Image (spheres, rainbow, N blue to C red):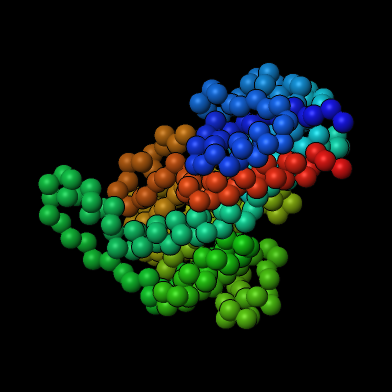
Amino acid sequence: MTKPNILVALSTFGAYGPEPLELLQKKGWPYTLNLLGQRLAAKDILQLGRDCQGIVAGVEVYTGDILSELSQLKCISRCGVGLDNIDLPKAEQLGIKVLNTPDPVIVPVAELTIGMMLDLLRHITWHTVSLRDNKWQKKGGRNLQGCTVGIIGLGRIGKKVSELLKSFGSRVIATDPHPDTEWAKTHKIMILPLNELLSRSDVVTLHLKVDAKVPFVLSEKEIRGMKRGAVLLNLSRGELVDENALYGALKDGHLSGAGLDVFHEEPYRGKLTELGNVILTPHVATLTAESRLQMETQAVQNLFSGLEI
Protein backbone atom coordinates (compact mmCIF):
# COMPACT_ATOMS: atom_id res chain seq x y z
CA MET A 1 0.00 0.00 0.00
CA THR A 2 1.31 3.46 -0.95
CA LYS A 3 1.94 5.68 2.05
CA PRO A 4 -0.74 8.42 2.21
CA ASN A 5 0.17 12.10 2.09
CA ILE A 6 -0.97 14.14 5.09
CA LEU A 7 -1.72 17.86 5.46
CA VAL A 8 -1.44 19.27 8.97
CA ALA A 9 -3.62 22.37 8.64
CA LEU A 10 -3.10 23.86 12.12
CA SER A 11 -0.49 26.62 12.17
CA THR A 12 0.35 25.93 15.86
CA PHE A 13 0.62 22.15 15.54
CA GLY A 14 3.36 20.77 17.78
CA ALA A 15 3.79 24.01 19.74
CA TYR A 16 2.82 22.35 23.03
CA GLY A 17 4.94 19.22 22.77
CA PRO A 18 6.75 17.09 20.19
CA GLU A 19 4.63 13.95 20.56
CA PRO A 20 2.14 14.58 17.70
CA LEU A 21 4.90 15.25 15.17
CA GLU A 22 6.89 12.31 16.48
CA LEU A 23 3.89 10.06 15.84
CA LEU A 24 3.78 11.20 12.22
CA GLN A 25 7.52 10.78 11.81
CA LYS A 26 7.52 7.27 13.29
CA LYS A 27 4.69 6.27 10.98
CA GLY A 28 6.77 7.31 8.01
CA TRP A 29 3.90 8.94 6.18
CA PRO A 30 4.89 12.09 4.23
CA TYR A 31 3.26 15.23 5.62
CA THR A 32 3.01 18.95 4.92
CA LEU A 33 2.81 21.53 7.72
CA ASN A 34 0.98 24.85 7.68
CA LEU A 35 3.88 27.29 7.83
CA LEU A 36 1.77 30.37 6.99
CA GLY A 37 1.27 31.28 10.65
CA GLN A 38 -2.48 31.71 10.25
CA ARG A 39 -5.73 29.89 9.55
CA LEU A 40 -5.78 28.42 6.05
CA ALA A 41 -8.03 30.10 3.50
CA ALA A 42 -9.79 28.12 0.78
CA LYS A 43 -6.99 28.68 -1.75
CA ASP A 44 -4.41 27.52 0.79
CA ILE A 45 -6.32 24.30 1.54
CA LEU A 46 -6.61 23.53 -2.17
CA GLN A 47 -2.95 24.25 -2.81
CA LEU A 48 -1.50 22.39 0.17
CA GLY A 49 -4.02 19.55 0.22
CA ARG A 50 -4.42 18.74 -3.46
CA ASP A 51 -2.43 15.47 -3.22
CA CYS A 52 -3.41 14.56 0.34
CA GLN A 53 -5.38 11.54 1.48
CA GLY A 54 -5.62 12.80 5.07
CA ILE A 55 -5.91 16.16 6.83
CA VAL A 56 -5.37 17.02 10.48
CA ALA A 57 -7.80 19.92 10.58
CA GLY A 58 -8.44 22.96 12.74
CA VAL A 59 -11.29 25.47 12.36
CA GLU A 60 -10.58 26.32 8.71
CA VAL A 61 -13.66 25.85 6.52
CA TYR A 62 -14.19 22.82 4.28
CA THR A 63 -17.08 23.63 2.00
CA GLY A 64 -18.64 21.15 -0.38
CA ASP A 65 -16.76 22.75 -3.27
CA ILE A 66 -13.42 22.40 -1.48
CA LEU A 67 -14.10 18.76 -0.61
CA SER A 68 -15.02 18.05 -4.23
CA GLU A 69 -11.71 19.57 -5.39
CA LEU A 70 -9.68 17.42 -2.98
CA SER A 71 -10.17 14.32 -5.09
CA GLN A 72 -7.76 12.08 -3.14
CA LEU A 73 -9.00 12.98 0.34
CA LYS A 74 -10.16 10.02 2.43
CA CYS A 75 -10.17 11.31 6.01
CA ILE A 76 -10.39 14.61 7.93
CA SER A 77 -9.28 14.31 11.55
CA ARG A 78 -10.50 17.41 13.37
CA CYS A 79 -8.31 18.63 16.23
CA GLY A 80 -11.22 19.73 18.43
CA VAL A 81 -14.86 18.92 18.89
CA GLY A 82 -16.93 21.17 16.60
CA LEU A 83 -17.61 19.97 13.05
CA ASP A 84 -19.71 22.89 11.78
CA ASN A 85 -16.74 24.06 9.67
CA ILE A 86 -17.03 20.91 7.55
CA ASP A 87 -19.79 20.12 5.04
CA LEU A 88 -20.64 16.77 6.58
CA PRO A 89 -23.31 15.67 4.06
CA LYS A 90 -20.88 16.33 1.19
CA ALA A 91 -18.11 14.49 3.04
CA GLU A 92 -20.39 11.49 3.52
CA GLN A 93 -21.40 11.61 -0.15
CA LEU A 94 -17.74 11.58 -1.19
CA GLY A 95 -16.82 8.82 1.23
CA ILE A 96 -14.59 11.05 3.36
CA LYS A 97 -14.37 9.99 7.01
CA VAL A 98 -14.66 12.85 9.52
CA LEU A 99 -13.35 12.29 13.05
CA ASN A 100 -12.94 14.61 16.05
CA THR A 101 -11.45 14.79 19.56
CA PRO A 102 -14.28 15.68 21.96
CA ASP A 103 -12.85 14.56 25.30
CA PRO A 104 -9.71 16.74 25.76
CA VAL A 105 -11.73 19.98 25.48
CA ILE A 106 -14.07 19.27 28.38
CA VAL A 107 -11.91 20.36 31.33
CA PRO A 108 -10.39 23.55 29.82
CA VAL A 109 -13.74 24.88 28.61
CA ALA A 110 -15.45 24.07 31.90
CA GLU A 111 -12.66 25.68 33.93
CA LEU A 112 -12.67 28.88 31.83
CA THR A 113 -16.45 29.01 32.25
CA ILE A 114 -16.12 28.97 36.04
CA GLY A 115 -13.28 31.50 35.84
CA MET A 116 -15.44 33.91 33.86
CA MET A 117 -18.32 33.48 36.31
CA LEU A 118 -16.09 34.35 39.26
CA ASP A 119 -14.58 37.30 37.38
CA LEU A 120 -17.97 38.76 36.49
CA LEU A 121 -19.58 38.14 39.87
CA ARG A 122 -16.63 39.69 41.75
CA HIS A 123 -15.73 42.31 39.09
CA ILE A 124 -12.09 41.19 38.99
CA THR A 125 -11.30 42.61 35.56
CA TRP A 126 -13.25 45.80 36.32
CA HIS A 127 -11.21 46.43 39.47
CA THR A 128 -7.96 45.65 37.63
CA VAL A 129 -8.74 48.18 34.90
CA SER A 130 -9.69 50.79 37.52
CA LEU A 131 -6.41 50.36 39.38
CA ARG A 132 -4.45 50.60 36.13
CA ASP A 133 -6.22 53.93 35.61
CA ASN A 134 -5.01 54.99 39.10
CA LYS A 135 -8.56 54.83 40.51
CA TRP A 136 -9.20 53.30 43.93
CA GLN A 137 -12.79 52.18 43.36
CA LYS A 138 -14.76 49.32 44.87
CA LYS A 139 -17.76 47.53 43.41
CA GLY A 140 -19.63 45.00 45.53
CA GLY A 141 -19.94 41.53 44.07
CA ARG A 142 -21.83 38.30 44.59
CA ASN A 143 -20.97 34.80 45.79
CA LEU A 144 -21.10 31.96 43.30
CA GLN A 145 -22.28 29.85 46.22
CA GLY A 146 -26.06 30.16 46.37
CA CYS A 147 -26.39 31.53 42.82
CA THR A 148 -28.83 29.86 40.45
CA VAL A 149 -26.91 28.95 37.31
CA GLY A 150 -28.77 27.94 34.17
CA ILE A 151 -26.89 25.70 31.75
CA ILE A 152 -28.09 25.68 28.15
CA GLY A 153 -26.75 22.47 26.66
CA LEU A 154 -26.16 19.56 29.02
CA GLY A 155 -23.65 17.61 26.97
CA ARG A 156 -20.14 16.63 28.03
CA ILE A 157 -19.05 20.19 28.80
CA GLY A 158 -22.35 21.25 30.33
CA LYS A 159 -22.23 18.26 32.65
CA LYS A 160 -18.67 19.08 33.74
CA VAL A 161 -19.62 22.71 34.40
CA SER A 162 -22.56 21.55 36.51
CA GLU A 163 -20.31 19.27 38.56
CA LEU A 164 -17.88 22.12 39.26
CA LEU A 165 -20.76 24.43 40.19
CA LYS A 166 -22.13 21.89 42.65
CA SER A 167 -18.79 21.95 44.47
CA PHE A 168 -19.24 25.73 44.89
CA GLY A 169 -22.71 25.25 46.34
CA SER A 170 -24.57 26.75 43.38
CA ARG A 171 -28.11 25.78 42.42
CA VAL A 172 -27.95 24.30 38.90
CA ILE A 173 -30.81 24.12 36.43
CA ALA A 174 -30.56 23.17 32.76
CA THR A 175 -32.24 22.94 29.39
CA ASP A 176 -31.30 20.82 26.39
CA PRO A 177 -33.03 19.74 23.14
CA HIS A 178 -32.28 16.10 24.02
CA PRO A 179 -31.68 16.04 27.78
CA ASP A 180 -30.02 13.14 29.58
CA THR A 181 -32.82 12.94 32.12
CA GLU A 182 -31.33 10.02 34.05
CA TRP A 183 -28.03 11.84 34.54
CA ALA A 184 -29.84 15.04 35.54
CA LYS A 185 -31.98 13.15 38.06
CA THR A 186 -28.93 11.45 39.58
CA HIS A 187 -27.15 14.80 39.95
CA LYS A 188 -30.27 16.62 41.19
CA ILE A 189 -30.41 19.04 38.26
CA MET A 190 -33.84 20.26 37.21
CA ILE A 191 -34.54 20.28 33.45
CA LEU A 192 -36.69 23.30 32.55
CA PRO A 193 -38.08 24.97 29.44
CA LEU A 194 -35.78 27.71 28.12
CA ASN A 195 -37.96 30.67 29.10
CA GLU A 196 -38.30 29.44 32.68
CA LEU A 197 -34.55 28.82 32.95
CA LEU A 198 -33.79 32.33 31.69
CA SER A 199 -36.20 34.00 34.12
CA ARG A 200 -34.86 32.10 37.14
CA SER A 201 -31.08 32.18 36.56
CA ASP A 202 -28.59 34.59 38.10
CA VAL A 203 -26.03 33.26 35.61
CA VAL A 204 -26.75 31.68 32.21
CA THR A 205 -24.02 29.75 30.39
CA LEU A 206 -24.22 28.34 26.87
CA HIS A 207 -22.73 24.95 26.01
CA LEU A 208 -24.91 24.01 23.07
CA LYS A 209 -23.55 22.76 19.76
CA VAL A 210 -24.79 24.30 16.51
CA ASP A 211 -27.37 21.97 14.99
CA ALA A 212 -29.05 22.88 11.69
CA LYS A 213 -31.94 20.56 12.59
CA VAL A 214 -32.55 22.37 15.89
CA PRO A 215 -31.91 26.11 15.25
CA PHE A 216 -31.17 28.12 18.38
CA VAL A 217 -30.31 31.72 19.15
CA LEU A 218 -30.65 33.96 22.20
CA SER A 219 -32.32 36.90 20.47
CA GLU A 220 -33.74 40.15 21.86
CA LYS A 221 -36.80 38.36 23.22
CA GLU A 222 -34.84 35.71 25.11
CA ILE A 223 -32.24 38.15 26.45
CA ARG A 224 -34.94 40.49 27.71
CA GLY A 225 -36.59 37.46 29.30
CA MET A 226 -33.54 36.92 31.48
CA LYS A 227 -33.59 37.93 35.14
CA ARG A 228 -32.65 41.58 35.60
CA GLY A 229 -29.02 41.88 36.70
CA ALA A 230 -28.13 38.40 35.43
CA VAL A 231 -24.85 37.42 33.77
CA LEU A 232 -24.58 35.67 30.38
CA LEU A 233 -21.68 33.49 29.23
CA ASN A 234 -21.05 32.05 25.77
CA LEU A 235 -18.11 29.68 25.29
CA SER A 236 -19.90 27.59 22.68
CA ARG A 237 -20.53 29.21 19.27
CA GLY A 238 -20.90 32.87 18.32
CA GLU A 239 -24.04 32.19 16.28
CA LEU A 240 -25.97 31.31 19.43
CA VAL A 241 -26.23 34.90 20.71
CA ASP A 242 -27.57 38.07 19.05
CA GLU A 243 -24.63 40.37 19.81
CA ASN A 244 -26.58 43.58 19.12
CA ALA A 245 -29.35 42.56 21.53
CA LEU A 246 -26.75 41.60 24.11
CA TYR A 247 -25.02 44.96 23.75
CA GLY A 248 -28.32 46.78 24.35
CA ALA A 249 -29.14 44.74 27.45
CA LEU A 250 -25.67 45.35 28.91
CA LYS A 251 -25.72 49.04 28.03
CA ASP A 252 -29.04 49.77 29.74
CA GLY A 253 -28.34 47.56 32.76
CA HIS A 254 -30.83 44.78 32.12
CA LEU A 255 -27.86 42.42 32.33
CA SER A 256 -25.01 43.12 34.74
CA GLY A 257 -22.30 41.40 32.74
CA ALA A 258 -21.31 38.99 30.01
CA GLY A 259 -18.36 36.78 29.15
CA LEU A 260 -17.73 35.76 25.54
CA ASP A 261 -15.06 33.56 24.01
CA VAL A 262 -16.79 33.17 20.63
CA PHE A 263 -18.26 35.65 18.15
CA HIS A 264 -20.23 35.88 14.91
CA GLU A 265 -17.14 37.16 13.12
CA GLU A 266 -13.60 36.48 14.26
CA PRO A 267 -11.32 38.28 14.91
CA TYR A 268 -13.93 40.32 16.81
CA ARG A 269 -13.85 44.11 16.46
CA GLY A 270 -17.40 44.93 17.56
CA LYS A 271 -18.94 47.38 20.00
CA LEU A 272 -18.98 44.99 22.97
CA THR A 273 -15.32 45.99 23.39
CA GLU A 274 -16.59 49.42 24.52
CA LEU A 275 -18.29 48.09 27.66
CA GLY A 276 -16.65 47.71 31.06
CA ASN A 277 -18.98 44.94 32.22
CA VAL A 278 -17.89 42.46 29.54
CA ILE A 279 -15.04 39.94 29.49
CA LEU A 280 -13.87 39.05 25.99
CA THR A 281 -11.36 36.35 25.08
CA PRO A 282 -10.23 35.47 21.53
CA HIS A 283 -11.65 31.92 21.20
CA VAL A 284 -9.19 30.38 23.66
CA ALA A 285 -11.48 28.13 25.74
CA THR A 286 -9.66 24.95 24.69
CA LEU A 287 -6.23 26.56 24.59
CA THR A 288 -4.28 25.01 27.43
CA ALA A 289 -1.00 23.19 27.02
CA GLU A 290 -2.50 19.96 28.33
CA SER A 291 -5.60 19.99 26.15
CA ARG A 292 -3.80 21.03 22.96
CA LEU A 293 -1.25 18.27 23.33
CA GLN A 294 -3.98 15.71 23.99
CA MET A 295 -6.07 16.92 21.06
CA GLU A 296 -3.21 16.93 18.57
CA THR A 297 -2.00 13.50 19.65
CA GLN A 298 -5.51 12.06 19.49
CA ALA A 299 -6.15 13.71 16.10
CA VAL A 300 -3.07 12.03 14.64
CA GLN A 301 -4.08 8.68 16.12
CA ASN A 302 -7.60 9.12 14.71
CA LEU A 303 -6.13 9.86 11.30
CA PHE A 304 -4.09 6.66 11.38
CA SER A 305 -7.25 4.70 12.22
CA GLY A 306 -9.28 6.49 9.56
CA LEU A 307 -6.80 5.79 6.78
CA GLU A 308 -5.96 2.21 7.62
CA ILE A 309 -8.35 -0.63 6.90
Q: Position of residue 193 (x, y in %)?
A: 61, 70
Q: Is residue 286 left or right of residue 7?
A: left
| Residue at 63% from the left image edge and 62% from the top image edge | 155
Task: Name above or below for residue 81 compared with residue 21.
Answer: below
- In the image shown, does 272 or 169 lie closer to the viewer? 169
- The reply to whether residue 243 is in sight is no
Q: Position of residue 137 (x, y in %)?
A: 15, 56
Figure quadrant of the C terminus = top right
- The reply to whether residue 43 is in sight is yes
Q: Residue furthest front?
A: 26
| Residue at 40% from the left image edge and 57% from the top image edge | 116
The answer to which quarter of the image holds residue 120 is bottom left
Task: Name above or below for residue 117 compared with residue 248.
Answer: below
Q: Is residue 278 left or right of residue 53?
A: left
Q: Position of residue 91 (x, y in %)?
A: 80, 37
Task: Name above or below for residue 188 compared with residue 24.
Answer: below
| Residue at 86% from the left image edge and 37% from the top image edge | 95
Figure quadrant of the N terminus = top right
- In the image shown, does 194 or 144 lie closer to the viewer? 144
- In the image shown, does 305 or 132 lie closer to the viewer? 305
- In the image shown, does 107 or 276 lie closer to the viewer? 107
| Residue at 68% from the left image edge and 18% from the top image edge | 47
Tag count: 0
Q: Position of residue 98 (x, y in %)?
A: 75, 42
The answer to which quarter of the image holds residue 151 is bottom right
